[in-house]
Image (tube, grey):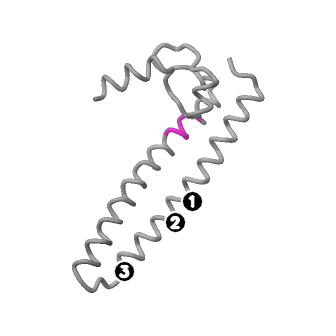
Amino acid sequence: MLTKVELEAFQNRLLDRRVQIERNLTGTSLELDSMRELELNDEGDYAAASAETIVDSAILEQQRKELNEIELALDKIKKGTYGICEMCEEPIGKPRLEVKSFARFCIACREINEKEHK
């Protein structure tokens, strides 16, 4: 079980990461908007801009997913269920939370969950 101090440390990490992602999302959205307004002179310009937009969109999507996971984790901290596996209801383990502070499953259950969703 996590101590109050450890829980606060994870909460602060999650809050910091949330701020960072929100900044990234806002910044990337502004960049994409300004790119759309550019006059593209030839097909090469358009292809390069298009490829970059696809990559930026994939990154945005990944960051939105992470933001959602962070919100879930912060909600769990409030409810007192943070750090407990959603499948087996056992503690996730501090080393795993250190690597992925919004982890929803312990390592064993994560592997089962990933196999089921492939």
Helix, strand or loop under label 1: helix
Amino acid carrying mark 3 in the image: Glu
Q: Circle 2 sits on which residue?
A: 27
**Which residue, given by chain and number where applicable, does mark 1 sit on?**
23
- Magenta span includes 71: yes
Residue positioned 42% across, 55% down in the render: 60
Q: What residue type is labelled 1?
A: Arg
Kindly report the distance in space between the C-alpha atoms of the residues bearing marks 2 and 1: 6 Å
| 27 versus 6 height, above or below | below
**Percent from the top left, x then y, of residue 79?**
62, 27
Q: Residues within 10 Å of mark 2 (few under 14, many from 20)?
A: few
Residue 52 sits above or below residue 97 on the image: below
Indicate the secondary structure of the residue bearing disc 3. Answer: helix
Outermost residue, front side? 44
Q: Are marks 2 and 1 in contact (CB under 8 Å)?
A: yes
- Residue position for label 3: 37
- Quadrant in which residue 52 is drawn: bottom left
Q: Residue at position x 45%, y 71% from top?
A: 31
Which residue is the extreme one toward the right?
A: 5
Q: Which quadrant holds residue 32?
A: bottom left
Magenta includes 16?
A: no
Quadrant containing the N terminus is top right
Residue span colored magenta = 69-73
Q: Where is residue 39 in the image (x, y as percent from the top left)?
A: 32, 85
Which amino acid does the dot numbered 2 rest on?
Gly
Q: Give percent across and percent down for residue 76.
A: 59, 29
In the picture, the quarter occupied by the C terminus is top left
